[in-house]
Image (cartoon, rainbow, N blue to C red):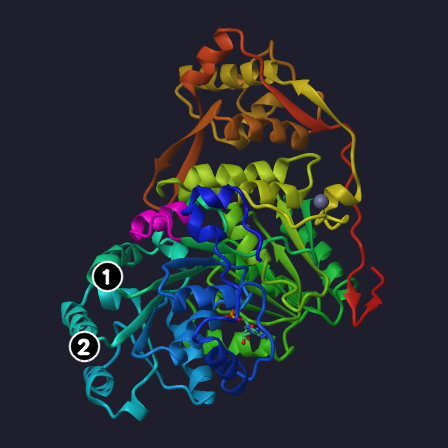
Amino acid sequence: QEQISQELLLNQSKSLAQKDWTGTHFEWSGRVREVLQDVFKISEFRHLQLSAINATLSKQDLILVMPTGGGKSLCYQLPALVSQGITLVISPLISLMEDQVMQLRKLGVGAEMLTGSTKREENTRIKNLISKGPASEKPKLLFVAPEKLAKNKSFMSFLQNLHRANGIARIAIDEVHCCSDWGHDFRPDYTFLGVLRDLFSDVPIIGLTATASNKVIADVQKILNLQGCLVLKAPFNRPNLYYEVRPKTAVQKDWLEEVADLLSAEFKGQSGIIYALSIKDTEELATGLRERNIKAGWYHASMSPELRSKAHTKWLEGKLQVIVATTAFGLGIDKPDVRFVIHHSISKSIENYYQESGRAGRDGRKAKCILYYRFADYFRLSTLVFAQQTGLQKLSHMLAYCTEPIKCRRELVAEHFSDTWGQGDDCKSMCDHCRRPRSSEQVDVTKHCISVYRLIRNALENETKLTANMLFDLWYGKGKPALRLKDIPAPTHSREYMENIVAHFISEGFVKEDFNFTAYSTTSYLKINTAGQQKLDAGYRIKTIVAVKAKRPSSPACEVNGKKMKA
Ligand code: ADP
Ligand code: MG
Ligand code: ZN
């Protein structure tokens, strides 16, 4: 019997969760095995696949949570061939649907797809084939874009007619976290899917996602009207991934040197991804790496589909060692031997970081995830995400992950997802902190917060708002003399050390941001949180953990073909 974590019981009814879905005693069990081997040419199920298939064939509504590459698609593709009627698959990306339709057709399975841009004749052909076609030619799966449902009454009416004729076997909602803005990829059209549970009341729904957080799952259940439904969740620890956070220099040239060195030594002959924040960054960084003899390409959403697909293919074929991409390079990437994922700047949230870095090491061999952190990057992101409902809160979790001085990176992610590790499944020195444990101490940083408050207040009295950068300049005795305060001495610690402390004030809410628009950009100024000031006035002490000796951890060599590579 598969393990069920205690927390998951919060999301679902106990009797469902405790039922054994793994068996081969169901009326469809023989047929399931046959289809697995004869159609999909697969000999064994992976973890949770059989349970998910049995549950959905039992007409249970279900949410399946499995890491990317875990094999979620099979859990609706296979039942589609066992059930009467069509399986409706809702998916957020046309490229993801195209890939699946192509693969299914190669296996001899009838599959069609409809999106907002499907031509009228094609639309009619597919609808006719589904409702009036000869049984042997009727497609078993129909892939639809969410906007096709949300914005197309005639299509909804087609589905209702089909349903009256018992023609819909099941509804699969891929990347189901897209309906929650707690996830990392909110799509407004997905919220419309909440009507499906009522409209097609006897049709089982299966939602699939790689987003593990219980908060997101609960939100998805609420939005889709699947409260209490069965949740099957695979373990999320990726034991073969090495996680590391490195400080990023302010000078781009130095970063390029460091990364070019990494790619031509430790990662020589290996393939990977560098994630960058902006389109401009991807092109600049890739160009900089090329100038340093690295075969680098770029990938972002403003390229034409042809150019994007060309870059993707060159990378898949190994003609490019690295692709420098915005997060547009993501969903649907299925290259098993990605040996490194480097982040040039922090992600928007821990969910995003887990997804993006998780594209490394799909083949199960060791791979490295290196995140370059610089305090200034936090503000580049905060000005992008502040308008999203939970944007700043999620970003502050990411900030806390980056500035955490000692704790295991894996443990931080696990805590975030309220995940339970499998028994005895620890980090095994596969993160920077576990590899080089540092001593730490708790320090009282209240006086620093008071200094920050005073500098901000003094600037305001001089009709100036402070960005974080301006604040640090003043604190260290630079910047406008009128804004400096003589009785606030320059910190004795490094700027990096003090930045971590101010990062703590931000993630704990003592310092807030004040966003100001110009025609071309948004600027984040620091402001005092009145509630924070009141706490300090009442004698509250702010404490935080710092590493005693900040030493950069060295990283282990990666394995290539079973042999250790020298760094
Ligand atoms: P996900 O949607 O969970 O990211 P996919 O469904 O795209 O993952 O599957 C990833 C890959 O794993 C695909 O190439 C798929 O064919 C393969 N796969 C799925 N299940 C199995 C299995 N039981 N045995 C071997 N390969 C599998
Ligand atoms: Mg998938
Ligand atoms: Zn660790």
| Magenta span | 217-229
N-terminal-most mark, 2 or 1:
2
Q: CA distance from mark 2 to mark 1?
A: 14 Å
SS at mark 2 in the image: loop
Q: Nearer the viewer, residue 469 or 13?
A: 13
Query: Which residue in the rendered view is the most extreme toward the top?
Result: 538
Q: Which amino acid is tagged 1?
A: Ser
Q: Quadrant of residue 92?
A: bottom left
Residue shown at 60% from the left, 65% from the top: 287
Q: Nearer the viewer, residue 317 or 88?
A: 88
Quadrant position of the N terminus in the picture: bottom right
Is residue 357 visible in this depiction of the protein?
A: yes
Residue 382, relative to residue 547: is it above or below?
A: below
Q: Magenta segment: does it hold 220?
A: yes
* Residue 399 marker: none
Q: Which amino acid is tagged 2?
A: Ala
Q: Magenta segment: does it hold 216?
A: no
SS at mark 1 in the image: loop
The residue that label 1 is drawn on is 201
**Disc 2 Cβ-to-ligand 2 distance below 8 Å:** no
| Residue 437: percent from left, percent from top | 79, 38
The answer to whether marks 2 and 1 mark residues whose Cβ atoms lie closer than 8 Å is no
| Residue 154: percent from left, percent from top | 14, 72
Residue shown at 22% from the left, 62% from the top: 150
The residue that label 2 is drawn on is 165
Mark 1 crowdedness (10 Å alpha carbons): few <14, some 14-19, many ≥20: few
Q: Nearer the viewer, residue 471 or 178?
A: 178
| Residue 317: percent from left, percent from top | 62, 80
